[in-house]
Amino acid sequence: MTRKQNIIMEEHTKKKKGTATEHSFWRAVGRRKQAVARVRLMEGTGVITINGKNFDVYFPQSIEQQLIQTPLTLVDMRLKRDVSVKVEGGGFRGQAEAVRHGISRTLIAMDPELKKTLRGEGLLTRDPRVKERKKPGLKRARRAPQFSKR
């Protein structure tokens, strides 16, 4: 990376990190497996929108809906903030956990004092588990072909 690119990168990160922009929203990225969620948190009435749809339409299962709401209910902001999310990659569960991770990070960007509460519940830790790659000579990552004695 050249010096000029480094300076531009520093300016770019200074603008975004932890401060509200002219539209007064906070943003962060959450990840889980192959899913990436870009989250925006703003003042509002508790509306959660994911990829342009209401979150209970995008995630019809109640377990995933509860998963997404966990960080907001934990800090009593469920009805005080609107959340807008663009999520891509992975499956439903991975996307739901990526959204939860992103919401937790935006809450920290908004108010750093919430970090202790969210950290205690394990909502700020990025789950590092991903699918293991397939190895040559095996059927899957660790599954070997069936052994035949004769």
Image (cartoon, rainbow, N blue to C red):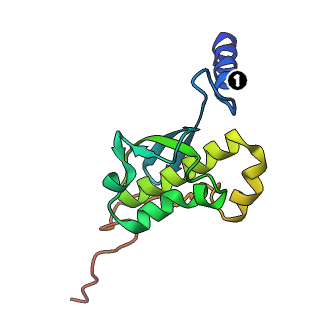
- Is 120 situated above or below 8? below
Count the marks: 1
Position of residue 15 measured from the top left corner of the image (x, y, whole percent): 66, 22
The answer to whether residue 50 is left or right of residue 32 is left
Q: Residue at x 56, y 48 (%)?
A: 103
Q: Quadrant of the C terminus?
A: bottom left
Question: In the rendered image, is residue 17 in sight?
Answer: yes
Q: Look at the picture and state if 129 lies above or below 50.
A: below
| Residue corresponding to mark 1 | 14
Along the viewing direction, whichever of 140 and 122 lies nearer the viewer: 122
Q: Could you tell me which secondary element the residue under label 1 belongs to?
A: helix
- The quarter of the picture where residue 17 lies is top right
* Residue situated furthest top in the rendering: 4
Q: Residues within 10 Å of mark 1 (few under 14, many from 20)?
A: few
Tell me what residue is drawn at x 33 percent, y 66 percent.
140
Q: Quadrant of residue 133?
A: bottom left
Q: Is residue 132 shown to the viewer in this render?
A: no
**Type of amino acid at the residue the image marks with label 1:** Lys
Q: Say left or right for 67 vs 11.
A: left
* Quadrant where the N terminus is found in the figure: top right
Residue 98 drawn at (x, y percent): 49, 51
Which is more toward the observer, 42 or 80? 80
The residue that appears at 39% across and 44% down in the rendered structure is 50
Q: Residue furthest left?
A: 150
Of residue 78 and residue 105, the one placed in the foreground of this image is 78
Going by the image, does 146 lie left or right of 49? left
Q: Residue 35: give x, y in percent of width and height.
A: 43, 49
Q: Is residue 143 above or below residue 92?
A: below
Residue located at (64% from left, 61% from top): 74
Instruction: Locate residue 69, reporting x and y percent.
Output: 52, 58
